[in-house]
Image (cartoon, rainbow, N blue to C red):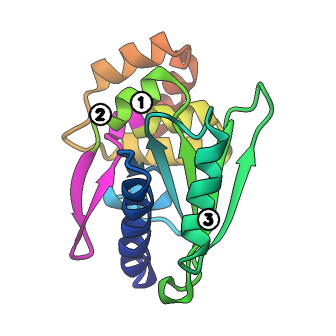
Amino acid sequence: MEPRFPRALKILHKLLLDAFAELQLPIRFALIGGLAMSAWGVVRATEDIDLLADNTPSPLSKLTLRDSVKKFLEDRGCKVEWRVGDVDDPIPLLLRITLPRAAHNLTADVLWAHKRWQREALGRIIKLRVSRMEVYVLHPEDLILMKLEAGGPRDLLDIEMLLSNPSPDLNLKRLKKKAIQLLLATELGRCLRHSRK
């Protein structure tokens, strides 16, 4: 992990916990992007921090919650933008945070869980030690499913790398079963074939 990320992660972690504590709402979140890949042993470059988050009530349906979170973060030196997708958008709600200077002005994208399986994935997060700090990361199976659903070229390459050197936590039988349920079995099969080349 690049040296600038640990400090930024600590600051982001505290900001999110403090924001939702002030609102008296619990929040769960975990790494899902390039840093999650690094946490699972796949080294690749990344320029930002990507998280999956969930809480009840969710800012997906509660507009006043979005305003409160935005104000809290802006009062602490962040630039904040809520991005709302269309009805059929695969990412219906994203919170983009540009962290303060103390966190190297890094950008964090927080995607809000909007499907049951994503909420369940946040119940299976794993705490890993990376660069002398503990971070919460999606279970490798759930990370693969997130990337299968996103389906971009970078996501598919990430999946192949995760599959070519699998974590002991990865249960391929369970992953295949879940991919079938989510109608992602064809894409998973393709990634599995490529990972064995």
Residue on which disc 1 sits: 119
Residues under numbered marks 2 and 3 in contact, where contact means CB atoms less than 8 Å apart: no
- Quick one: SS at disc 3? helix
Between 162 and 178, the residue placed more toward the observer is 178
Mark 2 residue crowding within 10 angstroms, few (<14) / some (14–19) / many (20+): few
Residue at horizontal 67%, vertical 41%?
Answer: 63
Residue type at numbered disc 2: Gly
Residue type at numbered disc 1: Arg
Within the magenta stretch, is there residue 136? yes
Residue at horizontal 46%, vertical 21%?
Answer: 116
Residues under numbered marks 2 and 1 in contact, where contact means CB atoms less than 8 Å apart: yes
Residue on which disc 3 sits: 71
Q: Earlier in the sequence, mark 1 or mark 3?
A: 3
Q: Which mark, residue 123?
A: 2
Q: CA distance from mark 2 to mark 1?
A: 7 Å
What residue range appears in magenta? 126-142
Give the total number of marks visible in the rendering.
Answer: 3
Residue at horizontal 54%, vertical 66%?
Answer: 72
Q: Position of residue 56 (x, y in %)?
A: 44, 34
